[in-house]
Amino acid sequence: MPVSSSTPVVTPGTIVCPHLDVPHQPGMNLVWSAALELAWKRLMKQAGGPIELAGVAPDDPAARLVRILNESPIEEGMLPREATVAWAGRADERGAGELRREIERVFGPAEARRVDVPDVSRITVVGGLDLHPQFTVPFARRTRTLAYRDKYAQAFGMWFDKDEPSDVWQRRSAQVVVHFPRYADDELAQLSDEERDAAYDDLVVEFRPADAAISLLVANVSWVSTLRDTVAGVLSHLQDVDGAPNARFTKKEGICLPVIRIACEAIFDQLSHRPIANCALRGRYLGELQQRVIFQFDEGGASAPSMMRNPYGGALMSPRRWYHDAPFNLLVVVERNARSPIFACWFGNSNAFVEGPEPEESARLRRYRRSDGRSVR
């Protein structure tokens, strides 16, 4: 959203996507929220149907963007209202007041005061999402940071700790469903080489927050051509039977993830000054499409720090034994029942991982290697 500050809210190395049909780029995060598409659907309602542009060739990039937004499957009720801004219309005196109230409702009064009113002569479409899922039983927070890619990040997750109350593991475990891999050790022996590689490399785990309307999918997969195709590949791994063998972590298993914090915004001007052909909005011109996303994924509530212990003490042979420093590159928030995506982030870099101090033992090792004349990272 345009603000009076000259510095936009941004997670560096991040592309904010107006839709899911955005190609991957090496080293870049891709962030998408369905809030903008919901705002577009509300504009369609005002127009009486799909938006049509006047005097635009079918192969014009603006026509493609309109076509993708018109065909979006996002509908009312799919996004959590308390976390979503989805507004479309003229920012005249009445419209500007509505927009400010919506922004204040989701992002707070300070943010509403910072908003510049869009051009009153054009139709503006604004999408915003501010989501920090909470869990009925918060997960554990690591007391020390873990190395993720190129940084030491704060971390959280679930693992069995004999010093915690006996029911804590069970209640945490009930909030997590493993969709892939679910192979038992004897099943691994029957897999092809390609299937076995996927069993060790790929990962799809579902976290279920207190808000029963949504789920978070954490995945490690190979990208396809676009973010939409990659997300579709993850959704294809989802299984329906929560009580199936290996659908839950055992006390000998667990998962640890970096704390994720995303703050980014973008203004899409491809449709600016384009005349609308729909009768209900004839004579109106489109203005900017604006998208803002604030997202945080952590233990989801106040939680005493827990120590992670690897019960096997060394390298683990089975892909189901222990996800210590789980490799992952995609996070998707879905409507839980329909499993329709409403938020997605592809992690091409570590900029969204919340940094923490280097563990002292790692610092000592680095100092030792330096004094010993060895190369260090």
Image (spheres, rainbow, N blue to C red):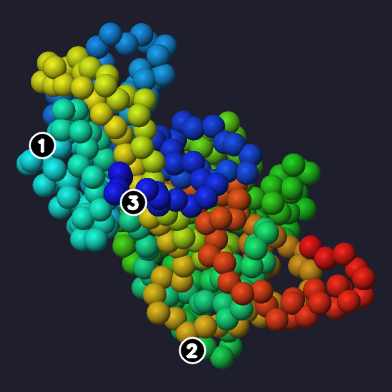
Residue closest to the far left: 94
Which amino acid type corresponds to the residue marked 3 in the rendered image? Ser
Label 3 residue SS = loop
Residue that appears at 13% across and 17% down = 282
Image side of residue 346 versus residue 370, left or right = left
**Any part of residue 255 in sight:** no
Residue hosting label 2: 165
Label 1 neighbour load within 10 Å: few <14, some 14-19, many 20+: some
Label 2 neighbour load within 10 Å: few <14, some 14-19, many 20+: few
Q: Which percent across, then down, holds residue 293?
A: 37, 50
Residue 5 has which mark?
A: 3
Asked whether the residues under the numbered discs 3 and 1 touch, taking CB atoms below 8 Å apart as contact, a structural biologist would say no
Asked whether the residues under the numbered discs 2 and 3 touch, taking CB atoms below 8 Å apart as contact, a structural biologist would say no
Distance CA(mark 3)–CA(mark 1): 22 Å
Q: Which percent across, then down, holds residue 155?
A: 56, 70
Residue hosting label 1: 92
* Image: 359 above or below 191: below
Label 3 neighbour load within 10 Å: few <14, some 14-19, many 20+: few
Label 1 residue SS = loop
Q: Earlier in the sequence, mark 3 or mark 1?
A: 3
Q: Quadrant of residue 44?
A: top left
